[in-house]
Image (cartoon, helix red, strand yellow):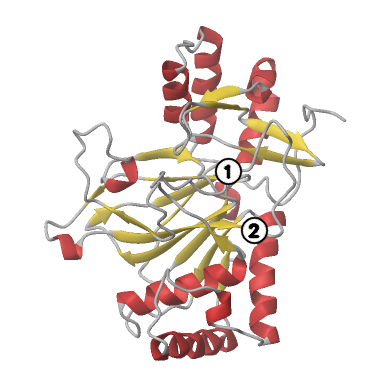
Amino acid sequence: MNTILKEKITDKCAWIGQDIADKTDWIHHLSEQALSVLDQGLKVLELTQLKAPNFSKEDVVIHDEQFLNEMAVIAEELENGYGFLLIRGLDPHKYNETQLSSLYYLIGVYLGLPVTQNARGDLLGHVQNVGDINDKNTRVYETNLYLPYHTDMSDVVGLLSIRKAKQGGLSSVVSFSTVYNEILEKYPEYLSYFYHPTYYAHLGEALPSLSPIFSYWDGKLAGRYLRAYIELGHEIMNVPVSRVQKEALDIFDHVSQDPRLRLDMMLEPGDVQFCNNYTVMHSRTSFEDFEQLGARRKLLRLWLKMDNARALAPDFPGRNGIPAADA
């Protein structure tokens, strides 16, 4: 079995942002039937006094074939299509924040299995500008700073927009396969480095563990990237990042940030974005927020373990969730 892919990827996942920016096939509008089924599910939740994230599929059993097929189409597109989707149809004027959260979570449990996002065991993350940028323990998503391209610790990551910022805060995605193609064409001498295991300071692990940036297995390429966690992992393990490693990471960042390759979008209230973490990296521009906390930009994040996720190599283990802290 080949461990390094040496051919250009031509599948749908190898999209170029400027080529699809004016297309609409990466936007999925929920059908009227799906919205009706979701409304019925919301009524069940409210009658039983349940709300996100404190329910599962078993609490809202849906047999509607059209709805289930629609969820299957979304899951298929995430795994074998572009690797991301913008989903529209949830009306922020019709539902309050609690109801939007539950509808979003209901979609999530019918796409995959929500997994924990921190040591507290939270299944629904709040992405909001509430952190202290001078505190090194503050995670970047809790600030209004630029969020570099990265992947999260799950098969799929979802974001529901509750409120926009006063200005800025664009969501940006870029294809791992397209970044790969660019490196293969322009910087082939660095390609093998990205297959070499490097230390990552994964959240929830006592010590950094090894994982490559690219992994080719069972006919599919998978990626994993967050430069800050790679550099921190090497620092913790007292293994300095070498000059050639730094050059390779600089090249990776340069290619990823190419305006021609990336796709920017504004998540309007009620919009949902799902990304396959093995095929797409996501980012966010900096933004100016409102002074009042209740008016600030807010998104809700889901991490999903997917039944149709690609097979992963032994040296590229799946990372679905952050283990809960010992009691």
Classify residue 2 as left or right of residue 98: right
Residue 62 shown left or right of residue 164 in the figure: right
x, y percentage for residue 59?
A: 53, 81
Q: Which mark is residue 306?
A: 2
What is the three-letter code of the residue carrying label 2? Met
Residue at the image position 26 percent from the left and 45 percent from the top: 143
The residues bearing labels 2 and 1 have C-alpha atoms spaced at a distance of 12 Å
**Which badge, 2 or 1, comes first in the chain's sequence?**
2
Above or below, 24 relative to 138: below
Identify whether 61 is placed above or below 141.
below
Secondary structure of the residue carrying numbered label 2: loop
Mark 1 is surrounded, within 10 Å at the Cα level, by few (under 14), some (14 to 19) or many (20 or more) other residues, namely some
Q: Nearer the viewer, residue 57 or 300?
A: 57
Q: Say which amino acid is labelled 1.
A: Arg
Residue at numbered disc 1? 319
Q: Looking at the picture, how far across and down is residue 93, in whole percent? A: 32, 82
Seen at 38% across and 47% down, the residue is 327
Which residue is at a point 58% across and 62% down the rendered structure image? 113
